[in-house]
Image: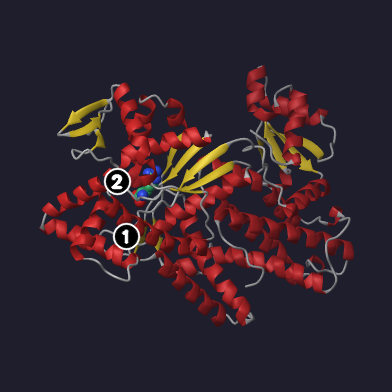
Amino acid sequence: MAHYTPLHQAAADVVARLANVDAADLKVETPPKPAMGDLAVGCFAIAKAQGKNPAAVAQDIATAFQPTGMLASASAAGPFVNFRADRAAALGWTIEHATRGTLVPTELGAGKSITIDYSSPNISKHLAYHHIRSTMIGHSLVQIFRALGYRVIGINHLGDWGKTHGMLVAAWHKWGPIEPLDISVLNDLYVRYREAIKANPALDGEARAYFKKLEAGDAETRALWTRFRDISLAEYQTVYDALGIQFDEIRGESAYEHDIPRVMSELAASKLLTESEGATVVWLDGEKEPVIIKTSDDTTVYATRDLATAEYRWTTYHPARSLYVVDRGQALHFKQVFKVLALMGHADAAKVCEHVPFGLVRIGGKKTGTRTGQVVLLKDVLAEAEQRVRDVIVAGGADLSPEVLASVAPVVGIGAVVFANLASQRERDVDFEWEKVIALTGDSGPYLQYSHARCASIVRKAAKDGLTVAGEVDYRKLGTDAEWAVARRLMDYADVVVRAAAVCEPHLVCHYLLDLAATFSRWYTEGNGDASLRVLCEDAPTRTARLALVGAVQATLASGLGLLGIAAPEQM
Ligand code: ARG
């Protein structure tokens, strides 16, 4: 395993050299009790490989140990070698890197690209609250991979092609024109047409006929569709702007129109196509239903366009990973698409594809959706969050100017909603409850933002008194266990970000930040009872060193919130 701080690297190097093994194979852990030491390296694997007793191996290493720049002492505890850090050296490295924002290594992703398909809503429908999941999990993954040095291509794969869009055109001809035309009108037309099909199945044929016209390039149909698409995109953009999201590529399903003939001939050449009830399909081993490639109307479907999309992403970006952040309801779809892709001669492209599934959001215990018309709009939730945050801040008696309140309320409201959606493992369902979402204390986004603002206010207060962290800092002044605990959490940051990327789980970052904030708070509140423990204490060198540690925490909280797509205001 890789070691992301020189302290961890030093422990691994010592053991590697003394036991004659590779440092990269060693795991550097934290002993269960601080009294045992700062770092521990287990000797089981070494002992096994060398036919020795683990405790004896640990003892030999501890005996032969000589202090290094980062490590002060070593002792054996059963099969473990426990090390004590040279705290001043480790603190110095950590604080300086945290403050500069260089705790996270950027070599991992250097020279690699990664495509992340996220948000990807279907046009002509509202951007509903549930869209926040793909949108924010994806946005967070974009930030996480970028922090690790990857070239990230964040893609909005708009659902802008298919029978649904034939439905909209059919509805327009039936009940339109309706002006002014906006997303609500489009959404209503869609819901109304779906209802009408139930009573009159012939309308489904009309919708299909219009989609066939669209695919055939009929100018009038196409112009209408373009208008619907433009209106939808402009509407979504306002929400993306509020959330701070910018896609690197907005390329919907319609963009793959011209690739379909090639996809069809590749499928045919690989002898994959058969006919089933008039449709063109691929049968996969062990599956009860075939994968439909073309309908009996000879139009393409979602899967056909995803095959073309996957090829495009592979040939255009050669990604090391190609992620699809889409709800778990589409697991079978992606499994089939990736399989067909491999069978049709694109095994390389298929190998990098990964569906990143997530659970649903329930409002009032119920699943939400656009089909029924019972839809909670994402923009409405964000607006309400802002209003509720404003009320809470005002009720709490915070001393903020109207200007600051106006800028803080939206970002704290958004932070609250976003955090609530990222804080648990992504495959878990999320229950939407205002009380939980908007809580300014406890495990919430606002609590993290507040912790950050508190650091900022300490730094600000010091600066007012002419105190800054400039020049040499004497890190030996940071001696308490509470201070060391804060530094240890800072040292874990890189490892957390690396793991979050590996398993595509932003919630690991959420938990880390909560822990960092709590550790910081424990240190900070120690000063309540004892003036000598305050950050802004009497002794100038100690004050400067503590201020540097506060700055390091502030920078890391801001960085971590940034990875979640949450802003870190300086005041709140
Ligand atoms: N538009 C689809 C939906 O709303 C999601 C698209 C996901 N991306 C993809 N390449 N299939 O369900």
- Residue 9 appears at what percent x and percent y? 73, 36
Residue 98 visible in rendering: yes
- Residue 382 appears at what percent x and percent y? 46, 68
Tell me: 216 left or right of 564. left
Q: Which of the two residues, 71 or 258, is positioned nearer the viewer here?
A: 258
Q: Which of the two residues, 59 or 251, is positioned nearer the viewer here?
A: 251
The quadrant of the rendering that contains the N terminus is: top right
State the residue position of label 2: 217
- Dividing the picture into quadrants, the one containing residue 181 is bottom left
Task: Establish if 482 lies above or below 324.
Answer: below
Task: Establish if 394 lies above or below 369.
Answer: below
**Disc 2 residue type?**
Gly
**Cα distance in 3D space between marks 1 and 2:** 35 Å
Residue at point 34%, 26% (across, down): 266
Q: Which of the two residues, 361 or 195, is positioned nearer the viewer here?
A: 195
The quadrant of the rendering that contains the C terminus is: bottom right
Q: Nearer the viewer, mark 1 or mark 2?
A: 2
Mark 1 Cα shell of 10 Å, populated few (<14), some (14-19), many (≥20): some
- Residue 449 appears at what percent x and percent y? 60, 65
Mark 2 Cα shell of 10 Å, populated few (<14), some (14-19), many (≥20): few
State the residue position of label 1: 368
- Dividing the picture into quadrants, the one containing residue 129 is bottom left
**Disc 1 residue type?**
Thr
Tell me: 143 left or right of 232. right
Q: Residue furthest front?
A: 219
Numbered tag placed on residue 99 in the rendering: none
